[in-house]
Image: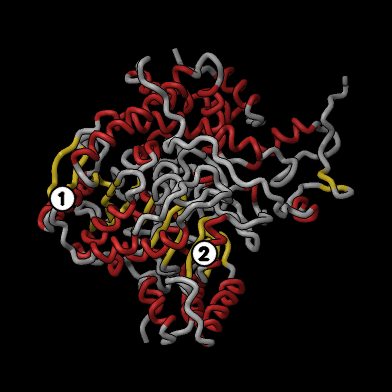
């Protein structure tokens, strides 16, 4: 039995906001299954008593002085915008027809 | 007249600062070389001739007025990986998503290079968002290896390493998440260093896997890498993971190493880094390297790091998990590619269509893999276990560094493979990072230095040197000593001149 089905990959793509094609699904499903087979090896040594490491250099509570610093101007912030209107980012509608 | 493109950065700087040549002449020589060979090599995504010459003119003007050079590398040209932001040049990360995007700010690395008077020639090609080991995942076409244009220059920083081996630049910047500085260095016969995690600021380094990403120097000699390391390293309040400690004395260590004497240095070779995935010629080169280190006075012993076998699987869970989160920022709303914005589609549909159109297959694979590894129900088995493996790898390093000063291994299991050979087999591609990943997971410093040509295919091989976190200077001491005795390699790169585009 595979680690991951084609339907599960389709669901993942939806969660990840990737409008993948049917052809891509066929390819990705097989590849992801093969990769998951290989990476599952971590389970062989990851015993209960081993603490996890999320970061190689343990640093906590890094603060800086709370000083006013120049930020981006409106023009700079909008310079790379796919669409702008009246000094704001213009985005597609966020509600569906039924809402 | 000396060919200025053949000189190491240290010599170029000395000539510029002594006013034997101008920074403009040096810069122009490299721009000419780029114009001559980059049609074939394709190391650069963007060349900023005007900006580079303007920087060079400013350096020359300073020197003419008797001022001290801004740094040891003032006036020396450099190629910058296209994953570091530049407010006067596009920053694409090799992705269609960011095609033509000009960031509104400079990365700290970029800012430090400018402050040091380093001449930025342009931006180099890379695997999309630094995901890959061959630079074939660039949306803008592959980079070719100057040793053999049919082969890959490594990845993700193949543009940076190829620019050095093609004599288009004497210095380059790379970034290394799983080997993206060291593996390209190995397969192009150049030097690449991944500093200790937190040693170089990540501010303005477009994030792939934040707990692993680290920028570092690429060069043709160990001393040049050290000089560049000192320019870019150091604490940065804009990066909360930046280490607030003095930069290790890497230049002094490189100069000390140049004597070639390694008496009293304890070197461990990792037993686990050999076997079925390793090319015979690579292992042969590594054996010779161990012999040479012994002759130079080092005490060479075998060390076992049993959990290193699990580094590759752990990496291919941790890096995709972090990438799935980091790349969520490319939502087609504030910057980057937007498609299907026709008034019919919702923001969510536009987002999905834009990401589908803007990302290549490897980026999509990793985003989905990471999304899977982080999802409830699978988290403990995959991401949680991978984080435990990370602890085990750090323990293996800690135990090893009680016995030895540095660890060594081949940098890569094979020499440069052919373009196209592994594109349809992601797992085969991942094996290129087999030896480089442990240092990323543990945050250690590591270097690749050329160890000659493989006797089965005549292509460059890299010797990897690994040091404990914050002991980056050990890499430079051992690397420079090894390099001095081994001798130059890049004078054997085939001539690229006269190649038609």
- Residue B113's disc number: 2
User: B21 and B459: which one is in front?
Assistant: B21
Q: Residue at x 36, y 49 (%)?
A: B183
- Can you give x and y, in whole percent of width and height, for residue B227 in the image? 39, 65
Q: Report the residue marked by disc 1.
A: B290
Q: Residue at x 72, y 41 (%)?
A: B332
Q: Residue at x 59, y 17 (%)?
A: A7
Residue B139 in sight:
no
Element carrying mark 1: helix
- Can you give x and y, in whole percent of width and height, for residue A26 in the image? 55, 26
**Apparent side of residue B52 relative to residue A81 in the rendered image (left or right):** left
Outermost residue, right side: A86
In the image, is residue B216 above or below residue A24?
below
**Which sits earlier in the primary sequence, circle 2 or circle 1?**
2
Chain where mark 1 sits = B
Q: Residues within 10 Å of mark 1 (few under 14, many from 20)?
A: many
Residue A35 in sight:
yes
Distance between mark 2 and mark 1 Cα atoms: 36 Å
Element carrying mark 2: helix
- Can you give x and y, in whole percent of width and height, for residue A9 in the image? 57, 22
Chain where mark 2 sits = B
Q: Are marks 2 and 1 in contact (CB under 8 Å)?
A: no
Please tell me whether mark 2 or mark 1 is closer to you in this view.
2
Quadrant containing the N terminus of chain B in the rendered view: bottom left
Corner quadrant of residue A23? top right
**Apparent side of residue B384 relative to residue B268 in the rendered image (left or right):** right
In the image, is residue A44 above or below residue B290?
above
User: B487 and B23: which one is in front?
Assistant: B23
């Amino acid at each position: 039995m595979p680690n991951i089905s084609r339907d599960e990959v389709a669901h993942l793509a939806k969660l990840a906001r990737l409008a993948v094609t049917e052809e891509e699904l066929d390819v990705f499903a097989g590849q992801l299954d093969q990769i998951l087979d290989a990476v599952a090896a971590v389970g062989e040594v990851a015993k209960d008593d081993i603490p996890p490491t999320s970061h190689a250099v343990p640093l906590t509570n890094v603060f800086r002085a709370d000083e006013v610093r120049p930020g981006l101007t409106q023009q700079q912030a909008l310079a790379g915008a796919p669409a702008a209107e009246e000094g704001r980012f213009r985005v597609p509608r966020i509600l569906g027809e039924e809402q | 007249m000396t060919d200025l493109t053949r000189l190491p950065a240290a010599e170029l700087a000395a000539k510029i600062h002594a006013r034997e040549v101008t920074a403009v002449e040096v810069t122009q020589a490299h721009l000419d070389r780029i114009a001559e060979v980059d049609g074939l090599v394709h190391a650069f995504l963007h060349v900023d001739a005007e900006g580079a010459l303007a920087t060079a003119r400013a350096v020359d003007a300073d020197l003419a007025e008797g001022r001290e050079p801004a740094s040891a590398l003032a006036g020396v040209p450099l190629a910058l990986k296209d994953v570091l932001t530049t407010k006067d040049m596009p920053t694409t990360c090799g992705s269609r998503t960011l095609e033509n995007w000009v960031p509104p700010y400079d990365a700290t690395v970029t800012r430090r290079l400018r402050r040091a008077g380093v001449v930025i020639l342009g931006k180099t090609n890379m695997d999309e968002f630094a995901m890959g080991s061959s630079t074939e995942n660039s949306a803008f076409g592959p980079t070719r290896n100057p040793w053999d244009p049919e082969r890959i220059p490594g990845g993700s920083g193949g543009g940076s390493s190829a620019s050095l081996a093609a004599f288009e630049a004497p210095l380059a910047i790379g970034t290394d998440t799983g080997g993206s500085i060291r593996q390209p260095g190995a397969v192009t016969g150049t030097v690449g260093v991944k500093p200790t995690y937190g040693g170089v600021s990540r501010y303005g380094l477009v994030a792939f896997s934040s707990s692993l990403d680290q920028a570092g120097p690429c060069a043709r000699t160990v001393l040049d890498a050290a000089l560049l390391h000192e320019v870019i390293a150091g604490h940065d309040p804009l990066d909360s993971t930046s280490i607030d400690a003095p930069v290790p004395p890497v230049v002094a260590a490189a100069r000390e190493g140049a004597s070639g004497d390694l008496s009293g240095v304890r070197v461990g070779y990792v037993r686990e880094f050999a076997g079925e995935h390793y090319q015979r010629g690579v292992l042969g080169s590594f054996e010779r390297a161990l012999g040479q280190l012994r002759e130079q006075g080092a005490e060479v012993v075998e060390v076992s790091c049993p959990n290193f076998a699990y580094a590759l699987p752990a990496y291919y869970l941790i890096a995709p998990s972090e990438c799935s989160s980091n790349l969520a920022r490319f939502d087609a709303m504030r910057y980057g590619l937007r498609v299907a914005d026709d008034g019919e589609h919702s923001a969510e549909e536009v987002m999905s269509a834009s990401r589908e159109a803007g990302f290549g297959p490897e980026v999509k694979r990793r985003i989905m893999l990471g999304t899977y590894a982080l999802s409830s129900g699978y988290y403990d088995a995959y991401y949680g276990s991978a984080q435990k493996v990370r602890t085990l790898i750090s323990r293996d390093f800690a135990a090893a560094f009680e016995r030895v000063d540095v660890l060594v291994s081949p940098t890569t299991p094979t020499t440069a493979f052919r373009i196209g050979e592994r594109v349809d087999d992601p797992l085969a591609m991942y094996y290129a990072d087999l030896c480089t990943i442990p240092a990323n997971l543990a945050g250690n410093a590591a270097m690749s230095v050329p160890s000659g040509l493989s006797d089965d295919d005549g292509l460059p091989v890299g010797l990897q040197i690994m040091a404990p976190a914050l002991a980056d200077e050990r890499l430079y001491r051992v690397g420079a000593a090894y390099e001095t005795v081994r001798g130059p390699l890049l004078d054997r790169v085939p001539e690229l001149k006269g190649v038609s585009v």
